[in-house]
């Protein structure tokens, strides 16, 4: 295995210069090119962990997700890893399953300099362990004024969902959602939906269960059975995620309710099962690529002790699918 001294000799530079190139410290373009060529020719592989002991860097970032089963989190992880790679960083994936002890172990890793920083989507009780000294970027959750967070404009998304249901001809709207007891920005989807309905005096209902996932499916089905199957009092639904929208669709179709003829449905996320997948349901698409790009850029700035904005809010947009009527058809 080649050594850093051999790389320096091949490139005609000092060991210190090779170290600068490896650690992304600026040198003359010609010098950098010569060092990179020598590294390639000698197949030199720096020991990033040994190097981390010297420069207090490991060039790794931990990504904490509640689950990797959800398509949104899978697509987000893919894009975060891709962006980190462009910055010569590696990603450690933590599939926490909502377990705060698992999440705390990753926070401890960061505090012990085993990773340089953390990007996290978490709804656990970890507020007391999060400090401004820890390089952490939160996605979709506000911790405190010192911890930066990246989020889609969920409030706008709720407004857009209500707007497009109305424009598609819906007369009586409904929001269907469930969420964590911990406050997070995804709740703004419901707030935006209500804001639009109140502003334009549209009839609406809310089915929102907080913190009781085990009861959600049964109670949601009871609600749909009563309001749609029996009373036919709802003809437009905004579901807080695409996953919930699909559950609603499957339940209603089993009861011979035609989508979108009888009831129109809009989800939220715009997730894909593959890179070239076509989104089938009407939805509010989160800019997943931008969320990943901004989160990675922010964590790199924090690691480098640079000042960044505390809130990065990204726009969303409506995607017409097969679960709402097009305006000219309404």
Image (cartoon, grey):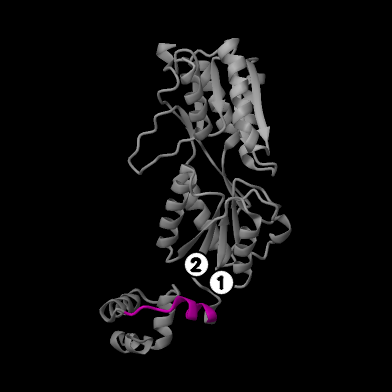
Q: Position of residue 146 (x, y in %)?
A: 69, 56
**Between disc 1 and disc 2, whose residue precedes?**
2
Q: Marks 2 and 1: in contact by CB < 8 Å?
A: yes
Of residue 85 and residue 69, the one placed in the foreground of this image is 69
Q: Position of residue 84 (x, y in %)?
A: 45, 60
Q: Is residue 295 left or right of residue 311?
A: left
Residue in the image at 28% along x and 86% along y: 10
Q: Is residue 20 left or right of residue 136?
A: left
Q: Position of residue 198 (x, y in %)?
A: 67, 20
- 135 relative to 205, above or below: below
Kindly tell me whether residue 16 is visible in this rendering.
yes
Q: Position of residue 236 (x, y in %)?
A: 54, 18
Residue that mark 1 sits on = 114
Magenta span? 44-53
Residue that mark 2 sits on = 60
Residue in the image at 55% along x and 62% along y: 301
Element marked by disc 2? strand
Disc 2 residue crowd, few under 14, some 14–19, many 20+, Cα 10 Å: many
Kindly tell me whether residue 187 is visible in this rendering.
no
Q: Which mark is residue 200?
A: none
Residue in the image at 62% along x and 15% along y: 226
- Outermost residue on the right side: it is 128
Q: Is residue 326 magenta?
A: no
Residue in the image at 39% along x and 82% along y: 18
Q: Is residue 50 magenta?
A: yes
Disc 1 residue crowd, few under 14, some 14–19, many 20+, Cα 10 Å: many
């Amino acid at each position: 295995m080649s050594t850093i001294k051999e790389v320096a000799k091949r490139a005609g530079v000092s060991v210190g210069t090779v170290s600068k190139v490896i650690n992304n410290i600026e040198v003359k373009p010609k010098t950098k090119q010569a060092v990179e060529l020598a590294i390639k020719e000698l197949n030199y592989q720096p020991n990033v962990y040994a190097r981390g002991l010297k420069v207090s860097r490991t060039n790794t970032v931990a990504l904490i997700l509640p689950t990797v089963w959800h398509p949104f989190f899978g697509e987000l992880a893919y894009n975060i890893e891709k962006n980190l790679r462009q910055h010569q960083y590696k990603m450690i994936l933590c599939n926490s399953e909502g377990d705060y002890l698992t999440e705390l172990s990753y926070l401890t890793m960061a505090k012990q300099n085993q990773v340089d920083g953390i990007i996290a989507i978490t709804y656990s009780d970890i507020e007391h362990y999060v400090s401004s000294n820890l390089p952490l970027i939160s996605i979709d959750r506000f911790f405190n004024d010192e911890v930066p967070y990246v989020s889609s404009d969920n409030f706008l998304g709720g407004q857009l969902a209500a707007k497009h249901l109305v424009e598609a001809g819906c007369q009586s709207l409904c929001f269907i959602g469930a969420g964590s007891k911990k406050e997070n920005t995804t709740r703004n989807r419901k707030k935006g939906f209500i804001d639009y309905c109140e502003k334009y005096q549209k009839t609406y209902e809310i089915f929102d269960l907080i913190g009781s996932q085990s009861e959600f499916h049964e109670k949601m089905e009871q609600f749909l059975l009563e309001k749609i199957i029996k009373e036919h009092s709802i003809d437009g639904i905004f579901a807080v995620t695409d996953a919930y929208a699909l559950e609603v669709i499957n339940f209603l179709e089993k009861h011979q309710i035609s989508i979108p003829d009888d009831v129109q449905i809009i989800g939220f996320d715009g997730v894909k099962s593959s890179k070239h997948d076509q989104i089938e349901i009407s939805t509010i698409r989160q800019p997943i690529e931008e969320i990943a790009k901004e989160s990675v850029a922010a964590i790199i700035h924090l690691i480098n002790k640079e000042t960044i904005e505390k809130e990065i809010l990204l726009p969303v947009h409506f995607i017409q699918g097969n679960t709402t009527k097009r305006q000219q058809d309404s």
